[in-house]
Amino acid sequence: MTGEGPSHEELVRYRRAVAELVDDLPGAAASSVVLAAARRPEVCAVLDHLPGGAPAALERLAEEVRCFRPSPRSNAATAARMARIVLLQQVDVVWYGTVPPFADTEAVLGAAELTSLAALRRRGQLRFHYRVGTSALPRRARDHVVRRWLPGLEPRTSGLSHPLARPEMVAVLNEIADRFAEAVPAWRRGLWVNCLVRSTLDQYRLRELGYSALLPSAHCTGHAADIEMAWLHRHGVAGALHDVLTDYADDGTLNVIDEGQAWHVCLHPDRIGHYGTTVARSAGGAR
């Protein structure tokens, strides 16, 4: 394990190796995927930046994939696909694994570094859409009506755990929304974000419900988001967002993971300053 993170070139080689592993072993057992990963120097070069190095990381990967059970709530249909998600998620862990996570709702709500999405939306400073997860009857009734009579109007998502975000994440998501809008000017329903900040406790609860909620997670430090993709596929505009997100991955700004219904994005630590400066002035006092 070194004191510095992997280089951009190392990450490019890592992502390529992970893609090749899954393509070569589409229906493989978890043990086969892990053994194949252990034989790839491009994979080990990145995993060596984690505590315990590549051996410990691969052991954790094997356990995660071994416990995987396909379900409508999981992000993958096979163990190999789950291995791909977990391997790519290790880039998030390399970047933010030493940042203290938000332990619970109290920690999230008390975090001075997070800003209110509702306040930004009221001020016209939010260029993406979101829904807040709720058990309140009026909201659930409204969502039921939309899904029953206007199924294509909005994506089918449970909504954000907390309508809060780091200003730099708001800035990069606004920028993605702008580039997506430029790529498909006829599309008027914009970009939807399904997940931003979660607490560690949120992740444990989701795991209990069968979701692929990994730990540690950059959602729990506020540096990741999940962007709706399946709904855009149904409307024929997902290709444009695919290209936009791929550009961010290729230039090293984001770690991007195709998780099926949504694509997970995590902001590179070296880009926090750029996006934080962009939004800090406008987001100040938003809570």
Image (spheres, rainbow, N blue to C red):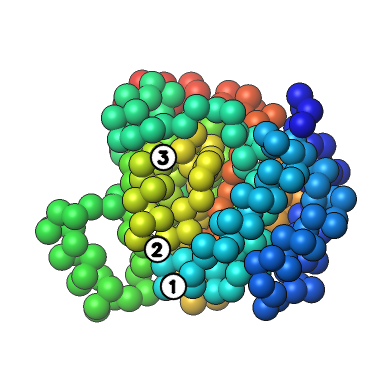
The residue type indicated by label 1 comes to: Ser
Considering depth in this image, is 197 or 85 the residue closer to the camera?
A: 85
Left or right of 80, for residue 39 = right
Give x and y (percent) for residue 251.
76, 45
Give the mark nearer the N terminus: 1 vs 3: 1
Q: Mark on residue 71?
A: 1
Let me know if residue 194 appears in the view: yes
The residue where tag 2 is placed is 210
- Look at the image and tell me in which quarter the N terminus lies: top right
How many numbered marks appear?
3
Q: Name the quadrant containing residue 139.
A: bottom left
Q: Is residue 223 above or below residue 153?
A: above
Identify which amino acid the numbered label 2 is placed on.
Answer: Gly
Q: Are marks 1 and 2 in contact (CB under 8 Å)?
A: yes
Dot 3 falls on a residue whose secondary structure is helix
Task: Using a 10 Å C-alpha cutoff, classify the residue at mark 1 as few (fewer than 14 neighbours), some (14 to 19) or many (20 or more).
Answer: few
Residue farthest toward the left in the current orientation of the protein: 137
76 relative position to 200: left or right: right
Say above or below: 140 vs 109.
below
| SS for dot 2 | loop
Which residue occupies 62% across, 40% down?
93
Label 1 element class: loop
**Which of the two residues, 54 or 206, is positioned nearer the viewer here?**
54
Residue 111: x percent and y percent?
37, 24
The numbered mark, 1 or 2, whose residue comes first in the sequence reads 1
Q: Which mark is residue 200?
A: 3
- Rendered residue at 87%/50% (across/down): 41
